[in-house]
Amino acid sequence: MVDMRGISVEFPGVKALSEVDFRLFPGEVHALMGENGAGKSTLIKALTGVYRTSAGTIRLNGRPVAFTGPGQAQQAGVSTVYQEVNLCSNLTVAENILLGREPRRFGAIDGRATRAAAAKLLDRIGLDIDPASQLGSHPIAVQQLVAIARALAVQARVLVLDEPTSSLDSDEVAELFRILRVLREEGVAILFVSHFIDQVYEIADRMTVLRNGRLVGEHLTRELDRLDLVSAMLGRELSTLEEVQRRTSHHAPGTEPVLQARGLGRAGAIAPFDLDIHAGEVVGLAGLLGSGRTELARLLFGADRPDTGTLTIGGKPARARGPRSMISHGVAFCSEDRKGEGVIADLSVRDNLVLAMQAARGWARPVPRRLAEDLVAEYIEKLDIRPADPGAVIGNLSGGNQQKVLLARWLVTRPRLLILDEPTRGIDVGAKAQIQKVVADLAAEGMAVVFISAELEEVVRVSDRVVVLRDRRKVAELAGHDVSVSDVMSAIAAQSGPVAAVAS
Amino acid sequence: MKRAQILWPLAALAGLLVLNIIVTPSFLSLRIQDGHLFGSTIDILRNGAPTMLIAVGMTLVIATRGIDLSVGAVAAIAGAIACTWIADGGNAVTAMIMALGVCVLLGLWNGFLVSVLGIQPIIATLVLMTAGRGVAMLLTEGQIITINDSLYSKIGAGFVVLPVAILISLAVLGGVALLTRRTALGMLIESVGVNPEASRLAGVRSRTIIWTVYVFAALCAGVAGLMISSNVNAADANSAGLWIEMDAILAVVIGGTSLAGGRYSLAGTLVGALVIQTLTTTVYTIGVPTNVTLVFKAVVVIAVCLLQSPRTAGFVRERRRRKQPSVSVPRPQKVGVR
């Protein structure tokens, strides 16, 4: 159905794709695999006309096409759901689903028909929300499903899903896959990009592997085992991806905790909780989406103001008066929302990396050019940031590399407590292992780390202690070496229904 | 800074100058009289000084994703305060200090509305844009106040080889460029403009920065207001600085700073302000009938903006590529990534 040959895409100074071939057949789920920056998103954007190809041909149903924009691609039956939710949060769910093709009546938009049509589509994917509600009032996961409903609203023959599952929990993933199977039966060709290898093996019939903008190979899923896939993606043997070892806790009991929260809470966000975090300790926060993980972290960092309770840092009471005062206490926070709360997209990697350090110094004392260059070079090397160009505009980097820059932004400030909210979401195995290893190393050097992840296995593997949240309430604290995923799961599920783990 | 972005405004400026030279061959000629430079180009610099000064302040405001519509009204207030004080027998220096002091207060007001109350900048400054002229009218009691003070008239009409007004504007522009690029202020302003929430979470004092740029913009407007009233030795609450905010915003945009905030270019603003003023002068020198003046201005501005837009650039590139499809470009084997 789709046949792309010899596709090359160039950005100023960077060749993002070089002579890649790609085929997609009707009625199949085809996974596009590769590390961050391998060119997956670029290939998709070349197909949908967001980027111009500098070489190569694209055929749709045998006819050569050259879309000049996603709108045109959509009319030809190629619908795309992007990694980051690209909807208008100020419009209603129904308006979002039918944006640009609203039913009209006497030239004006027919609100009732819009809602009815949207309700039908939502029903088709089994999503029970009010079409007239504002999109922004729903959690990200629901917004993602709305984006898929939107893609289905056109009679899509090719459905492109770029990281659709990175913000979904396991039930929602199962739901999504059910929908995908239905669509596959209907003969829709589905292009699927995911970092979750398990998910790819669960749903994909065929896969194409990219590395550094080049085609590595196309395989039937059942003919390629996981180890071969991972080494094909990385271009190296798996030995370098050793599992992060569980470490024993370094802090001796009775040591003054770095951070001590007593009865800290915020109405509507999280119920009052107590929490101690010691130096050299990794505390994991586990819980379902919307269980209050992020809300808890934001209170610790002062991003939101608490209604109740006290916070003590290094033995001194800290009034949470906003991020700036917490940073001066040595607390750092990497938000889960990379695009909205992390990167400064138009600025360079260098500026992004020194931003927190610069902010702490104040505007009058710029970070010396020399020091900035040294730091950037050091972290580009240490975290393997690609492209290794300090002057590159960060908005052009892939998600995983942006995440590494954000991590480096905080590491250069040498915090006492580092809070990482979903630092590994939507990034590949290699970068994931790298970030986990950095976390372990930091803790070994005496930094306290709060680690949040939707992947329970990862939380359990990285953390010395796991704090379990449910329904915006801290429900358990599991310590010791023998904490297992099933322990955490049963703590989460103590009252609510059964949960399946989304493992990597 | 991106070279291509400043290229087109420069080309426009050059084009306007050439047009002027063709129409009036003596356009570029300069003569020295009493140690002062005279000539059409000097006139352009002198008349463009207030716009340029206001555009400098506007550049920083726009870089933080804001806009300040009140600068014209603030300029009128500054002129009104200074002139009424001098007309009542006051000292020129005190008059200027008072006028600028009030401008700082007005800037604080704008900054408060935007950064503390979180009102959208276009609305927040619209308040003062309308109310400001009213205040200026109250101060002058609806009259045009004429004064005669040799020290005061130096700001707008004085000369130290070059007109004092343009020297002040260039000094402020240079000073701001140094201040923001030599310190980290420029980068922090840009980061607030690109992503305010991410900047806040990184510990940037977004509120203080935003507040400060509005105060600075009002101060620039105040000085510009003094220039305008000093040039004509009068305070005219109705027409002093009228529509100057539009010229300033245009200068900033022509200079390549995006209204969406973020990266800004003071050099671009300088060129942009010169383009605007040269354009205004050209309209008179080449004898465009008064009733089509604005249309002529609009055509030039649209042309510059079109040439600058990335989409046009892409379109032009596409056309060029299509014209020479047979040439096979050797493919570089080096992979850019890594």
Image (cartoon, rainbow, N blue to C red):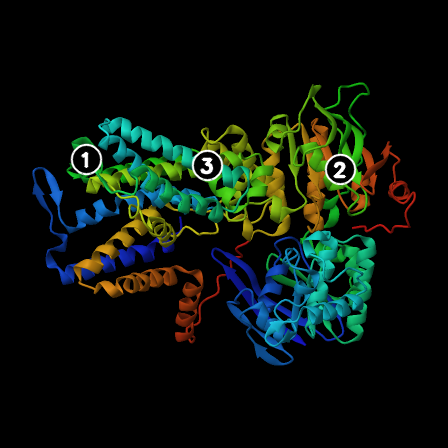
Q: Residues within 10 Å of mark 2 (few under 14, many from 20)?
A: few
Q: Which mark is residue B55?
A: none
Circle 1 is placed at which residue position?
B154
Q: Nearer the viewer, mark 3 or mark 2?
A: 3
Figure label count: 3
Nearest the eye: B253 or A206 = B253
Q: Quadrant of the N terminus of chain A?
A: bottom right
Counting from the top left corner in percent of width and height, residue B54 is at 34, 43
Circle 3 is placed at which residue position?
B109
Residue lying furthest front:
B141
Nearest the eye: A53 or A167 = A167
Q: Nearer the viewer, mark 1 or mark 3?
A: 3
Circle 2 is placed at which residue position?
A267
User: Dots 1 and 2: beta carbons under 8 Å?
Assistant: no
What's the chain of the residue with tag 3? Answer: B
Whole-angstrom CA distance, mark 3 to mark 2, is: 33 Å
